[in-house]
Each structure stands twice: as C-alpha cells, then as structure tokens.
Image (cartoon, rainbow, N blue to C red):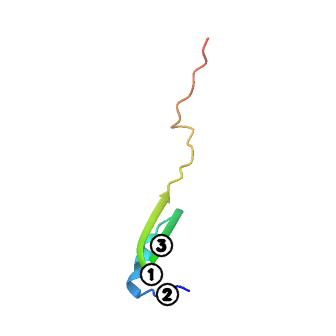
Amino acid sequence: MGKPLQIDEVWLKRIISNLEGMEYGSVSITVHDGRIMQIERTERKRFEQDTASVPQRTARR
C-alpha cells in the first residue's frame, strides 16, 4: 500500500482557489509518493446562442 496522503492548509487553500468561480470544468490533482505535486484546472465557458448576434443567411435565388 502507498504512503498516506497528507494535505496541509496551504494545499487546501490552493485547491479551493482553483474551484472558486468555476461553473463548468474540472480540477485534477497529481499525487506522487503520498504528496500533492500539481493542480491543473480546465475550465469550459458556455455561451447562450443569441439570435441577434448570429448572422442571418440570405436565400439564394
């Protein structure tokens, strides 16, 4: 069995700061030898399709 993971207050704050404000996405935590080594944040932005800003196609004759 591997070493038990130890999370101190600094890493908890880093994890929380990566989650704050995120609507869609993921946070990946890399652990090596029982220690957190890296945090990656992938965020997705979703936009509602606004019909006023979408160019209208003109019919070809």
Q: Residue furthest left?
A: 10
The three-letter code of the residue at mark 2 reads: Lys
> How far is mark 2 from mark 1, CA to CA?
6 Å
Q: Position of residue 58 (x, y in %)?
A: 57, 21
Tag of residue 11: none
User: If you read the primary sequence from the N terminus, does the residue marked by circle 3 or circle 2 appear first?
Assistant: 2
The three-letter code of the residue at mark 1 reads: Asp
Identify whether 10 is placed above or below 58: below
The mark total stands at 3
The three-letter code of the residue at mark 3 reads: Ile
> How far is mark 3 from mark 1, CA to CA?
13 Å
Q: Is residue 23 visible?
A: no
For the residues bearing labels 2 and 1, Cβ distance under 8 angstroms = yes
For the residues bearing labels 3 and 1, Cβ distance under 8 angstroms = no
Q: Is residue 34 visible?
A: yes
Q: Residue at x 50, y 54 (%)?
A: 45
- Quadrant holding the C terminus: top right
> How far is mark 3 from mark 2, CA to CA?
16 Å
Instruction: Give the labeled residue for mark 3.
Output: 29
Mark 3 nearby-residue class (10 Å; few <14, some 14–19, many ≥20): few
Tag of residue 33: 1
Secondary structure beneath dot 1 equals loop
Q: Residue furthest top?
A: 61
Q: Residue at x 56, y 48 (%)?
A: 48
Q: Nearer the viewer, mark 3 or mark 2?
A: 2
Q: Residue furthest front?
A: 1
Tag of residue 3: 2
